[in-house]
Amino acid sequence: MSRILFDFECSDHGVFEELVQSEDRVTPCPKCGKEAQRIISNVRIDWRNMGVSSDFPTCADKWEKMQRQKARKEDSSNLVMY
């Protein structure tokens, strides 16, 4: 099985990260060995290493694109054929 990086919290030493199986809810604290509970944490994604651009279109970008497409369509329907 693959291991996943999760955040855990020790009552004495605070939050730390550990590679564990997805079903593991507790792990020993690396400093004191005391049982630490898995906690919910923010998702961290490094877009640069995933080959994904972080320049996502905004709703304003999408609106402008739709307006340009609409204008082109209207322009092409106003053409007069001789």
Image: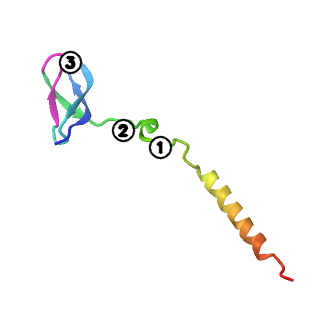
Q: Amino acid at mark 1?
A: Val
Label 2 sits on a secondary structure element that is loop
Point 15% across, 29% down: residue: 27
Point 18% across, 20% down: residue: 30
- Relative to 11, residue 46 above or below: below
Label 3 sits on a secondary structure element that is loop
Q: CA distance from mark 2 to mark 3?
A: 24 Å
Question: Which residue is denoted by mark 2 in the rendering?
Answer: 43
Q: Image quarter for residue 37?
A: top left
Question: Which residue is denoted by mark 3 in the rendering?
Answer: 12
Question: Which residue is denoted by mark 1 in the rendering?
Answer: 52
Which numbered disc, 1 or 3, marks the residue that appears first in the sequence?
3
Residues at marks 2 and 1 touching, judged by CB atoms closer than 8 Å: no
Q: Position of residue 5 (x, y in %)?
A: 26, 34
- The residue closer to the viewer here, 29 or 77, is 77
Q: Is residue 26 magenta?
A: yes
Q: Is residue 50 magenta?
A: no
Stretch of the chain drawn in magenta: 25-33
Q: CA distance from mark 2 to mark 1?
A: 16 Å
Residues at marks 2 and 3 touching, judged by CB atoms closer than 8 Å: no
- For mark 2, does the 10 Å Cα neighbourhood hold few (<14), some (14 to 19), or many (20 or more) residues? few
